[in-house]
Image (spheres, rainbow, N blue to C red):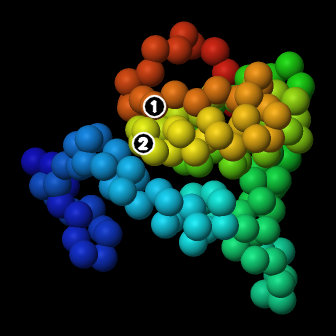
Amino acid sequence: MSDQITAAGVREAGAQAPPSKEVAGFYNDLSGLLTELFGGSLHEGYWTSPSDPASMAEASRQLTDLLVGKLEVKPEGRVLDLGCGSGAPAVQLARSTGAQVVGITNSAVQIEAAVRNAREAGLGDRVEFRCADATVLDYADRSFDA
């Protein structure tokens, strides 16, 4: 018996995850809007306090900075970013640490945006993006430091 997802987003016995083509289609259709709404990145933000005046874009960068600090990646490190979206966090990570970053998303639309973002940031040599299913990757064990 698999799980069911309710309207509240709760998984119940009996449901299966949506096929990866459906998920990719969702992101292909909505990436532009989501990226605009979230200030250039597709993940949430971090505000330092209830009075933090940061915009969504600033809070998104603050969240990425917080996570990058926790990773403690060295310049010679290699990082895998699963669900890289538009590539903004991967570009930010490569810029701030000097590490190599490989971003994976199943959305061709997001890959186009991510490659463009890396190129515009001058980091196309340190950030690579692949359109792939994150559950089926061909990297050897220990290919990444984080």
Which residue lies at the image location 76% right of the left edge and 22% below the top edge?
Answer: 125
Q: Is residue 96 above or below residue 133?
A: below
Q: What element does badge 1 sit on?
A: strand
For this rendering, which residue is in front, 66 or 123? 123
Residue 82's disc is: none
Q: What element does badge 2 sit on?
A: loop
> Is disc 2 surrounded by few (<14), some (14 to 19) or many (20+) residues within 10 Å?
many
Q: In the image, what residue type sits under mark 1? A: Cys
Which residue lies at the image location 57% right of the left edge and 61% below the top edge?
Answer: 35
- The residue that mark 1 highlights is 131
The Cα–Cα distance between marks 1 and 2, rounded to whole angstroms, is 6 Å
Q: In the image, what residue type sits under mark 2? A: Ser
Residue 90 visible in the picture: no
Q: Is residue 63 above or below residue 75?
A: below
For this rendering, which residue is in front, 44 or 86? 86
Nearer-N-terminus badge (1/2): 2
Which residue lies at the image location 45% right of the left edge and 31% below the top edge?
Answer: 131
Residue 15 visible in the picture: yes
- The residue that mark 2 highlights is 107
> Is disc 1 surrounded by few (<14), some (14 to 19) or many (20+) residues within 10 Å?
some
**Pointer 1 with pointer 2, Cβ within 8 A:** yes
For this rendering, which residue is in front, 21 or 80? 21
Q: Position of residue 8 (x, y in %)?
A: 30, 76
Q: Residue furthest bottom?
A: 51
Q: Position of residue 107 (x, y in %)?
A: 42, 42
Q: Position of residue 41 (x, y in %)?
A: 63, 57
Q: Position of residue 108 (x, y in %)?
A: 43, 39
**The quadrant where residue 99 appears:** top right
Q: Is residue 66 above or below residue 6?
A: above
